[in-house]
Amino acid sequence: MTERLSQKSVKLILEAAFLANKLGVEGIILDEVGIRGYNDDEGIIVASIKDHDFEFTGLGLSRLQSLMQKSTLLKDLDAVTVDMVSKENKPDVIEKLAFDAGKMNFEFRCALPQAIRDIPRTDLNRTPLFYFDITQEDVSNISKSMSAMRCKHMTIQGNGSDVRFRFSDEAGDILNFGIDSDLESLGENDTVSLTINLKKMLPILKLAVQDGNFRLNILKSNILYIVVGNMDVFVMPEV
């Protein structure tokens, strides 16, 4: 049994798979609850918790790097058709996706959603305690500072309306730079300080800034929340 996916669904699937693969998420689940994937080792969640009106009840995708390598062959997504192929004895179980780009076509075998690590099926709390905007220049400075200091971590310091990034190297040298955006506080406290792992955060920042300036939200328990395209990215604090 086969059924054609809409162009909207195809683009959402590939966008989610691309982001998840970039952030080391091994598999994603797509269903009536939304899209979600979890990198347990790094504490990173990618999600879009809402009903996207997919043509299926549940889809699991693993081997995301393989899917991305194949999808680079698709030059014009608007000219690509994708059919879902279900198992003969289980029409609700999608066995594979068949991509057809005219002269080129390929099939990609899907995974069972229940075989992929899931996150709680409730709307994730996005209410920030603090937030500020980050620009392309800020991301460039973070990358350059990381290389100059040869450090793995960066401390975000907010005091009143000021936001500064602090780097330190093994010799004890310190580098600081401030950003133009003000720290916005939605709670009683107007001071924040937290240290982030640049190895996992810098790729997220670089992806987010491709669409222009973006907002970095600091949630309860120092969870970081950033919107990347149509997806939400949550980064858990290191213990």
Image (tube, rainbow, N blue to C red):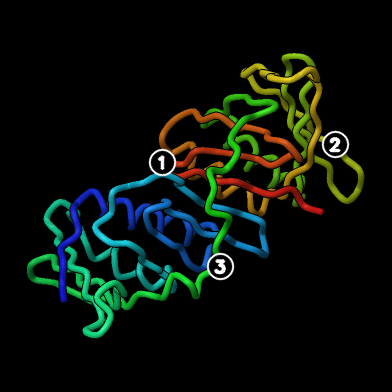
Q: Position of residue 134 (x, y in %)?
A: 57, 29
Q: Which residue is mark 1?
A: 229
Q: Amino acid at mark 3?
A: Arg
Q: Determine the residue located farthest toward the left in the rendered image.
A: 102
Q: Amino acid at mark 2?
A: Ile
For the residues labelled 1 and 3, the Cα–Cα distance comes to 23 Å
Q: Residues within 10 Å of mark 2 (few under 14, many from 20)?
A: few
Query: Which residue shows up at 51% across the image and 68% down it?
Result: 26
Q: Which residue is mark 2?
A: 174
Q: Amino acid at mark 1?
A: Gly
Instruction: Say which element carries label 3.
Output: loop
Look at the picture and state if 50 lies above or below 190: below
Q: Which residue is mark 3?
A: 117
Q: Looking at the image, is mark 1 or mark 3 nearer the viewer? A: 3
Which quarter of the image is occupied by the N terminus? bottom left
Q: Residues within 10 Å of mark 1 (few under 14, many from 20)?
A: some
Instruction: Say which element carries label 1.
Output: loop
Query: Which residue shows up at 32% across the image and 51% down it?
Result: 12
The first of marks 1 and 3 along the sequence is 3
Q: Looking at the image, is mark 2 or mark 1 nearer the viewer? A: 1
Q: Is residue 196 left or right of residue 37?
A: right
The first of marks 3 and 2 along the sequence is 3
Query: Which residue shows up at 72% across the image and 14% down it?
Result: 161
Q: Looking at the image, is mark 3 or mark 2 nearer the viewer? A: 3
For the residues labelled 3 and 2, the Cα–Cα distance comes to 40 Å
Q: Quadrant of residue 130?
A: top right
